Amino acid sequence: MSSQAHTATVATSTGIPHAKLGMWTFLASEVMLFGGLISSYVILRSGSPTMVIPPRTMMGVPLATLNTFVLISSSVTMVLALAAMKANELDKYMRYLAMTFGGGVIFLMIKAYEYNHKWHEGITISSNLFGSFYFTLTGLHALHVIGGMGIMAYLMWAGAKGHQSPTNYDRVEAGGLYWHFVDLVWVILFPILYLV
Amino acid sequence: MSESHAHAGEHGHAQPLSFWWKYVFSVDHKVIGIQYMITSFLFLLLGFAMMLLMRYQLATPQPGENFDPEHLGMVRGLIAWLFGEERMPYGFMAPEFYNQLGAMHGTIMIFLGVVPLGVAAFGNFVLPLQIGAEDMAFPRLNMASYWVYFVGGVVMLSSFLAPGGAAQSGWTSYAPLSVTAPPGQTIWLIAMVLIITSSLFGAINFIVTTLNLRAKGMSLGRMPVFCWAQFVTAVLLLLAFPVLEAGAILQLLDRVAGTSFFIPKDMIYGATVFPRAGGGNPLLWQHLFWFLAHPEVYVLLLPAFGIVSEIIATNTRKPLFGYKELVGSIVFIGVLSFVVWAHHMFLSGMRTSLANLFVTTTLIISVPSVAVLTCLLLSLRGARIRFTVPMLFALAFLPMFGIGGLTGLPLGFAPTDLHLHDTFYVIGHFHYVVAPGSLVALIGATYHWFPKMFGRKMNDTLGKIHFWGTVIPMNLIFFPMLIQGMWGMQRRLADPTLQWHNLPVQGWSTVILVGSVVMMAFQIPFLFNFFWSIWNGEKVGENPWEATTLEWACPSPPPHGNFAAPPEVHRGPYEYSVPGHQVDYWPQDEAA
């Protein structure tokens, strides 16, 4: 197991650290997972005779726009956290990671409010096909946000315990890749669920 | 070479590990590979046993004239007693139980048997050795992959205990029947998500390992065909399985959360309207399922291509014919396997123009498959073949897979497929690909790499008995299915004699039953040979087959960390009988 803790120092055939290549590979499969679900949505939305789309006012576009902004901002702080780690500035690294984590918290709180609101308006997971897709897609995305917050928490823990240094910045980079991907999924979900 | 191996034991973990950490919760790719191998053998036997029960039912679907419910006879009485009144009344199978066994046989054989054996067991054990790596890129993820698979398998089996029994909608779980099925189907879906997660872990690990952990000099063009096959397989698993996961999530929600992704509006179920919002489409499930399940066919097959290539190169003592063509074909199959899936759905009312597209891609994909087979056949030309036990299995693979591939062509054409769809012809076809094809190659691989795994050889005589006792009955099992299918006998029927047109070919079911029982009996010498040889087989050195690839350059069995010093690769993988070289093999790591 000792060989795994210092993956950054291991020379690899491609020159890309294991963590980064592994994360890209994982994200490729995630693309197919969300791709499968989003394609199903697109196909039924264009093909099903009974797909009722709620009016935009019911969807709460302003709140969702705010949420998009929150998530994109947290991606920016993630980039800054990685830069801080590369520059060996641990305090800044911890601060930016905390902000990223906070972005996730705010996103989920707004999401929870939205869920509650929609449920009371009668858009539920079983009310109609749109509701089913809305809660399935955003729910799976929210699970990914929670997973990403887990990664942030781990990276902060590693920073606090002194396990994090520029020599193994590659795992911060891998965690960041994941966070940007989760962000990107939302950027696709937002227009196809709220705007069109 | 051998002096340096004296230090191998000091490499990697110096402190001795307890039994649990060494053999159960191991992070060593070799131990995990063997764990996978033994577990998948158990699942294969279980799936085979289920099939024996079903074949017994199909051979005698109705009580005969002399049937006496008081005296069932030994076999029937035992079966009736074992499975109880509800599943096997008087030793005849209830249709629901037949459906459960059918669904579980397919699921177990594919997802818990052949794929784990071909990909996870041999891939894990051999791939890192062949590229000259210490271990996989993510050893702990590797261990997690095994345990998630194991738990998934246990959950899958536990579904037999659910009210209404195990999943009974076939291994394909077509909606909407699967949505309305008893709770066993929910357990099937949960188990599938676990199995998918496990193979995802494995796929990431294999891809990163192959790309990142190659020894010095091991360029992609010098990788053995087996590594290429495993790499392409991992890419298929990585990209195809998540789509089934998406489908499984949707089906799970359809079952537990009241959604209607696969439920059409106002669906009539049990003489009433199914209480759902509706608006979904059952065909969507078929697309999501087959988007995985066709690449999955190549997941079953590509490792077999790799294995047979290795065995043939070793035992013909000459370079493989067309290394580049083999690798190119395997990569091309991998790419193309993503655009053929709808040939499973010609009967679904698909538009003709769309069907034509999938007919075309399906026929194109047969070209690289034939190319692989041709390269392997031409590799035999003019060779002084060593007829070792693994070589017998590799040689049997070629014609058996050939039958499997050629019988697929009528299914690839939409017009003929309409007649053959869902008949025993389909069963015969894909079993020829998977059982006499892949599984025969995988058994060959067991004999081939056994010396590396345990430092001892399996017994040759028992191996030859096992070979003939497996390959001949296999054809008795699967060839009659092709005949029955052409007569129109449908799959998934507990009693085909209820349909008049099946009666003329019903007799073949007895032949199939006899073949199955004989084949099961001939697995006993194999199992005995396997476990007996672990402790009592003939001891061998590091390179008993005089092969060239890197796995034969470390001790048998390799210690944790594999190589004493990082190996350096100087040449391609199949340098056999090189003119001017003193012996007829030239290992990849031997300095010039």
Image: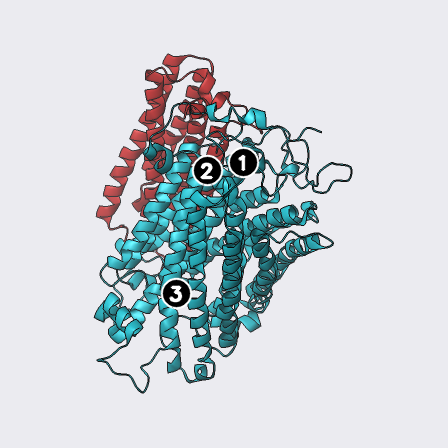
Chain colours: A red, B cyan
Q: For the residues marked 1 and 3, what is the alpha-carbon distance in whole angstroms?
A: 36 Å
Q: Residue at x 31, y 41 (%)?
A: A60
| Amino acid tagged 3 | Met
Q: Position of residue B76 (x, y in %)?
A: 29, 73
Which numbered dot is residue B51? 3
Give the residue number, with chain letter if any, for mark 1.
B129
Q: Are marks 1 and 2 in contact (CB under 8 Å)?
A: yes
Report crowding for label 1: few under 14, some 14 to 19, many 20 or more residues within 10 A (C-alpha): many
Tag 2 secondary structure: helix
For residue B459, above or below residue A171: below
Q: Residue at x 54, y 44 (%)?
A: B230
**Quadrant placement of the C terminus of chain B:** top right
- Viewer-nearest of discs 3 and 2: 2
Q: Residue at x 28, y 51 (%)?
A: A125
Q: Chain of mark 2?
A: B
Farthest residue in the bottom direction?
A: B65
Quadrant of residue B215 within the rendered picture? top right
